[in-house]
Amino acid sequence: QVHLVESGGGSVQPGGSLRLSCAASGNPDSRTSMAWFREAPGKEREGIASIYVRTGRIEYPSFAKGRFTISQDNAKNTVYLQMNNLKPEDTAIYYCAAANLLHTTLRASRYQYWGQGTQVTVSS
C-alpha cells in the first residue's frame, strides 16, 4: 500500500510561482514511477510531469515544458513540482500519483495510488 500527501497549493497572482510537495510512504516497489496531474472544473485530468524514481528519468507533455519542473528527494521520499510563471488557466486541483512501473507515463489510468489533491488558484 502507498500513501501520498500533497501540500504547497494556494492562491497566487499571474506570473507567480508555487512549489508543490508530495510525501510518499509505503512499499517503495509500488511507487517506482510518480507523477503530477491536474484537474480543472469541467476538464479531464491531465498529466503534467512524470518521473521514474530509480533513474530520475523525466517526461513532460509539451505544454508543461519550460514552466513546470518535477524533482525528487529520495532521502525524504518526496516528489516536488515547481511551477513558474503561473497563468489563470493553471487553476486546478493538483494530484500526486504513484505506480509500480518501469518507465514514466502521463496516462492517469496507469497509476494505482493517488493523493487527496491540493488546490492551486491563479487570479489577480
Image (spheres, rainbow, N blue to C red):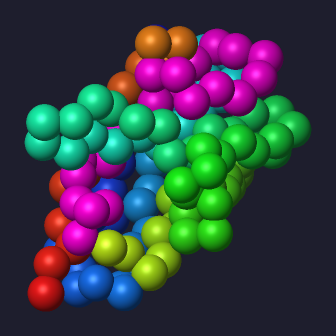
Q: Residue at x 37, y 87 (%)?
A: 15
In this view, 15 is above or below 116 = below
Residue 42 in sight in this render: yes
Using residue 30 as the reference point, say whether residue 46 is left or right of it: left
In which image quadrant can residue 38 be found? top left
Residue 66 x, y percent position in the rendering: 63, 69
| Whether residue 120 can be seen here | no
Residue 5: image location, x then y, percent:
35, 42
Image point 64% across, 26% down: which residue? 105
x%, y% of residue 106? 57, 30
- Going by the image, does 66 lie left or right of 37? right
Residue 101 at what x, y percent from top left?
Answer: 70, 15
Identify which residue, 62 or 37, lies in the foreground. 62
Up/down of 124 relative to 1, above or below:
below
Say which quarter of the image contains residue 43.
top left
Q: Which residues are magenta?
A: 88-108
Question: Left or right: where does residue 94 sit relative to residue 47?
Answer: left
Report the quarter where the C terminus lies: bottom left
Residue at image point 23% right, 80% down: 12
